[in-house]
Image: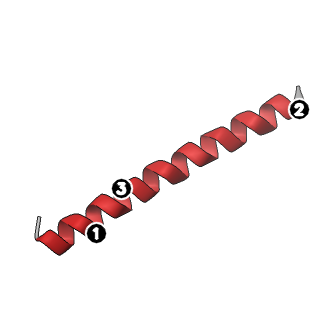
Amino acid sequence: EWNMQMMQAWAIQEMVVHLTVVKVDSWMVGSMLGF
């Protein structure tokens, strides 16, 4: 059970990091293109 919680916490963290990176990437591209 503890292992299951660890896996879930890790998966959520990975998802949050991924979404943050995508947001930052699109923001940087947008600012470079002048959007």
Q: Nearer the viewer, mark 1 or mark 2?
A: 1
The image shows residue 20, relative to residue 11, as above or below, that is: below
Q: Which residue is mark 1?
A: 28
Answer left or right for 8 relative to 22.
right
Residue at the spot 44% in from the left edge and 58% down from the top edge: 21
User: The residue under label 3 is which amino acid type?
Assistant: Lys
Q: Earlier in the sequence, mark 3 or mark 2?
A: 2
Residue 11 percent across, percent down from the top left: 65, 39
Q: Position of residue 2 (x, y in %)?
A: 89, 32
| Figure check: 9 above or below 31 | above
Give whichever of discs 1 and 2 has the lower sequence position.
Answer: 2
Q: Which residue is mark 3?
A: 23
Instruction: State which tag comes first along the sequence, 3 or 1.
Output: 3
Mark 2 surroundings within 10 Å by alpha-carbon count, few (fewer than 14), some (14 through 19), many (20 or more): few
Q: Is residue 3 toward the left or the right of residue 26 in the image? A: right
Mark linked to residue 10:
none
Q: Secondary structure at mark 1?
A: helix
Q: Is residue 22 above or below residue 34?
A: above
**Quadrant (top left, top right, bottom left, bottom right) of the N terminus:** top right
Residue 2 bears which disc, if any? Answer: 2
Q: Residue at x 71, y 40 (%)?
A: 9
Measured Cα–Cα span from mark 1 to mark 2: 39 Å
Residue at 19 percent of width and 71 percent of height: 31
Q: Nearer the viewer, residue 5 or 29?
A: 29
